[in-house]
Amino acid sequence: MIKDNVRFYRHLSKDKQSIFQQRMMQFLSQVYIDGVQLELQDLDRIRIAASAVIPVFGFKEWHYTNLTGILLCPDHFNEILEFHSKGQDRNIGGIVGNGRFEKQMILSRKALYHGFKNTSDKSNTGIHEFVHRIDKLDDFTNGIPERLLERQYTIPWLKLIHKEMEAINANKSDIRKYGGTNKAEFYAVAPEYFFKRPDLLKKKHPVSTFLKLVPRNQHYHK
């Protein structure tokens, strides 16, 4: 089932596929997943766990210490967890929790599934939200993952963010436009592109944005 639904997994060697499965099981044993107005299915758990493992698969050991639970909703929703309906101006597919939802994540099943089914775009809601969780390990979602980014890379990374965001907002970049919103969103959008369309990213951006950020995390080679 994983091979049929997770492209990243299909391109791994058999040995790495085994490790990937182990990492998924480890994640599922540490983080609870609840359905909101839906009955959880095995495929829900597979796609959520895969979303969690993909961004950190290059690290030998990883625990989302700032995440205890995930709420899965059937469709898009707004900030107060009401489901998206006609007339609302927000169409949210996922958020990292704050306030009463601290240490939780809320995902839309519709958005989660779209990220894995559509192989032609550069977006994946699951990966996007887990990258936000990585960013928030230092308690701030600001596009600067201090737990991962060695000090000597901080200034080059900030310069790169500024340059790429300017290009996005001037319609001179093929990175998803949402990445031009702020530094935190750029940090989440760039890895979506990197993990979903690595060949295209390499062609359009010969020195990958994400690899510039974490040079030692080169764990996806098609």
Image (tube, rainbow, N blue to C red):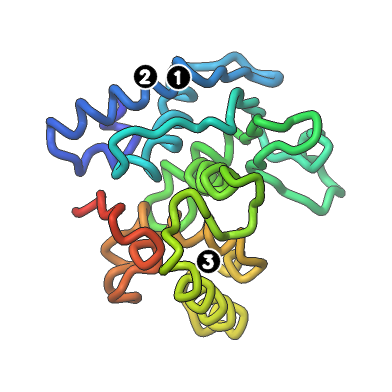
Say which of marks 3 and 1 sits in front: 1
Judging depth in this view, the residue of 70 and 113 nearest the camera is: 70
Instruction: Judge the density around disc 2: few (<14), some (14-19), many (≥20) Cα neighbours within 10 Å.
Output: some
* Residue of label 1: 28
Please state which amino acid type lies under the numbered disc 3: Arg
Please state which amino acid type lies under the numbered disc 1: Leu
Residue at 45 percent across and 75 percent down: it is: 156
The percent position of residue 42, horizontal first and vertical second, equals 44, 17
**Where does the N terminus fall, quadrant-wise?**
top left
Judging depth in this view, the residue of 119 and 56 nearest the camera is: 56
The answer to which image quadrant residue 52 occupies is: top left
Q: Are marks 2 and 3 in contact (CB under 8 Å)?
A: no
Q: 12 left or right of 136? A: left
Instruction: Determine whether the residue tagged by mark 2 lies in a helix, strand or loop.
Output: helix
Residue at 82 percent across and 53 percent down: it is: 89
Instruction: Determine whether the residue tagged by mark 3 lies in a helix, strand or loop.
Output: loop
Q: 25 left or right of 158? A: left
Compared to residue 68, the image places residue 166 above or below, namely below
Residue 20: numbered disc: none
* Residue of label 2: 25
Q: Are marks 2 and 1 in contact (CB under 8 Å)?
A: yes
